[in-house]
Image (cartoon, rainbow, N blue to C red):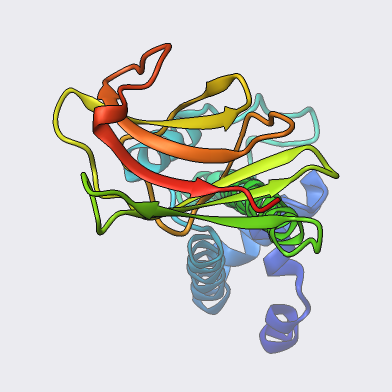
Amino acid sequence: MDIKQYITSGILELYVLERLEPAEMREVEANALQHPEIRSEIDQIEQVLEAFAIAAAPEVSPEILDRLLKEAKGKKAPASTPERTADVPTPATSSSFAWIPWLLAIAALAALLYAYTQLGNRTEELQDVQGRLEILQKDCDENQEVIRAAQQRLNEVTNPATQGIILAGTDNAPDKQAIVFYNQATNKTLFKAVNLPPPPAGKQYQLWAIDADGPKDLGVLALDLEGNVVLEVNYLPAVAAFAITLEDEGGKPAPDLSTLQVYGDVAG
């Protein structure tokens, strides 16, 4: 027998992987007993395949892998087939080769589990990105709405038919000031605080429209007025003047003129 050619023929690899016919398996086992070179080559093939299987497998819980290997090694070899004869000796180590396909199967299973885990992670990342995109889209929509509202206010304020009425401070509050934008063509009344500091505790500013029948309530103003905010208030036709008084928090049905803060006439 040409041992070198026999070793390089590939039959030993098939033997280790248990891919030979029973008669061929027995032949390899007999040759391994007779020739130490063949026995050594089988051992090396076993080691290489084992190392390859372990290297190819992604991280798996050591406890799980140890348990699976023990179960694989503990499995009994199948009953002898009729073709096997008792007079052909079997190497004592040949039974240990049976677990190599199990190890390869475990490696493949581990790879599938790893791929599944990676897919789950990518799915979670995608869902997270989609969630953030939805939040950004919502913020963008809200900002667009604010921009549209501001543009609309700007158009109303700059409308040629809109009157800008300065409400100047009175003797009660000479430094205070506000502006009313009054448009009788579009039936719009807008209000902007210029210098209305927060009122004292328990008090609130109240806006009035004064017509031929006297003052009409246009509502109480927010406690923390911002100077750059333009508010839309109730519209009344034929208003002669606008005024703000300082009333008890919540407002009153009729103004206390002794607390008059600012006042402005509508140009005729």
Residue 196 in the image: state x and y as whole percent: 31, 50
Give the residue drawn at x 36%, y 41%.
Answer: 66
Residue 140 in the image: state x and y as whole percent: 66, 55
Give the residue drawn at x 66%, y 41%.
Answer: 189
Quadrant showing the N terminus:
bottom right
Position of 212 relative to 33 (above/below): above
- The tally of labels here is 0
168 with respect to 24 (left or right) = left
Residue 121 in the image: state x and y as whole percent: 56, 49
Residue 123 in the image: state x and y as whole percent: 65, 46
**Residue 70, quarter of picture:** top left
Q: Nearer the viewer, residue 88 or 205?
A: 205
Q: Nearer the viewer, residue 215 or 73?
A: 215
Q: Nearer the viewer, residue 238 or 90?
A: 238
Position of 238 relative to 88 (above/below): above
Give the residue drawn at x 68%, y 47%.
Answer: 182
| Residue extending furthest toward the left | 201
Give the residue drawn at x 61%, y 54%.
Answer: 136
User: Could one spot residue 122 in this view of the protein?
Assistant: no
User: Could one spot residue 212 in this view of the protein?
Assistant: yes
| Residue extending furthest toward the top | 253
19 with respect to 242 (left or right) = right
Q: Nearer the viewer, residue 56 or 267?
A: 267
